[in-house]
Amino acid sequence: MKKVAVLTSGGDAPGMNACIRAVVRTGLFHGLEMVGVRRGYDGLMEGDFLPMDSHSVSNIIQRGGTILKTARSDRFRTKQGLDEAKKQLEDNDIEGLILIGGDGTFKGGLEFSKHTDIPCMGAPGTIDNDLFGTDYTIGFDTALNTVIYAVDKIRDTAASHNRLFFVEVMGRDAGFIALNSGVGCGAEDILIPESKTDIAEIIKRLEDGWKRHKSSCIIIVAEGDKEGGAFEIAEKVKQKFDHYDTRVTVIGHMQRGGSPTCFDRLLASRLGAATIEGLLNGRRNEMAGLVHNQITYTPFAQTRKHNVDINEGLLRIAHILSA
Ligand code: F6P
């Protein structure tokens, strides 16, 4: 193998740049010619390639976003899209492809692997932490720190005004950001799609707190909660329990940006290097992950987000600790 390409796809995540850097520099270390693909699978189908040397990834380990840019591409999943991508790689003598992204990225990688013999390897880059085959995804830790930084500030206002705040965090199908940040910021309740949200139960908890003279409350809501987003749930609660002055904050895309934490830089560096070394050791169509602090490889077909269980114990702890 002489020439390998790397792309980022799906939602950007802090640490993607650190991962690109690791992929490129590990590839160069092993004598490979490295190529970047701009705009994810869209750029792959259009042959939007750029040569990457060591200098091209200088000074990016600390930067959020992705220097290669990213996209969510429906066209890539069509036969025509897969054909175009294959042709572009073949025409440019590219013999291996590194994918940095989340669930949709590896779904695309799996389809591509059924369509071509060109081997792919993946690194998990998503703030959602919802991939099977790794304890942590690149960007999750930074997103958690962004959330608790915001909620700590909101709590100042909640406490000063005796208010109830519903804070919506990202995760349209997964509650990992909500659950972990909720414990980290001492939230009174955490609402996630994986566990049934019962409005009556939220109200009971609020009433108990009110009786114990709790002056303010923070409820973290994952955007994908089945009862609705933070605005909808706040309204439902307010109709039956209006002791607190209620406000809603949606943290939104702030969670996707910013300089990656040291944890994410380290994770991205280890996993980026592992994709190239896995590829050179003959691995094909697998995602590099970190499980119990060891590098592991999981076939794309198994990385699907619906294979990941939520840590119910954390939810229990959150309720005990916020009493
Ligand atoms: O997958 C990452 C993520 O940030 C989710 O948490 C969120 O639901 C989604 O992407 C938002 O996507 P977009 O930036 O396309 O609106």
Image (spheres, grey):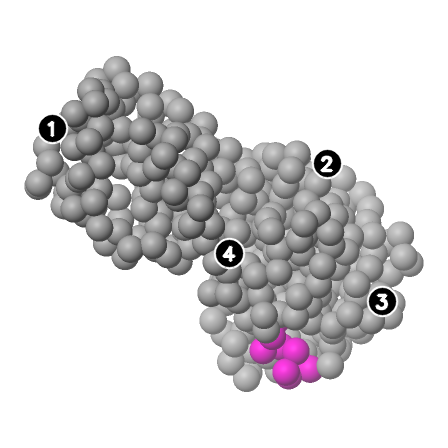
Whether residue 120 is situated above or below residue 16 in the rendered picture = below
Q: Residue at x 31, y 33 (%)?
A: 188
Q: Which mark is residue 101?
A: none
Q: Earlier in the sequence, mark 1 or mark 3?
A: 1
Q: Is residue 213 left or right of residue 316?
A: left
Residue 1 rendering spot, x and y as whole percentages: 86, 70
Q: Is residue 6 magenta?
A: no
What amino acid is labelled 3 in the image? Answer: Asn
Front tag of 3 and 2? 3
Q: Quadrant of the C terminus?
A: top left
| Pointer 1 or 4: first along the chain | 4
Q: Are marks 2 and 1 in contact (CB under 8 Å)?
A: no
- Residue ID at (42%, 50%): 312
The alpha-carbon separation of the residues under discs 3 and 2 comes to: 29 Å
- In the image, residue 262 above or below residue 57: above
**Can you give x and y, in whole percent of width and height, for residue 29 in the image?**
89, 52
Q: Report crowding for label 3: few under 14, some 14 to 19, many 20 or more residues within 10 A (C-alpha).
A: few
Which contiguous range is marked in magenta? Answer: 109-116
Q: Position of residue 86 (x, y in %)?
A: 67, 78
Label 2 to label 1: alpha-carbon separation: 52 Å
Instruction: Using the image, tell me which numbered label, if any, was put on residue 130.
Output: 4
Classify residue 60 by image quadrant: top right
- Ligand 1 under 8 Å from disc 2 Cβ: no
- Residue wearing tag 1: 243
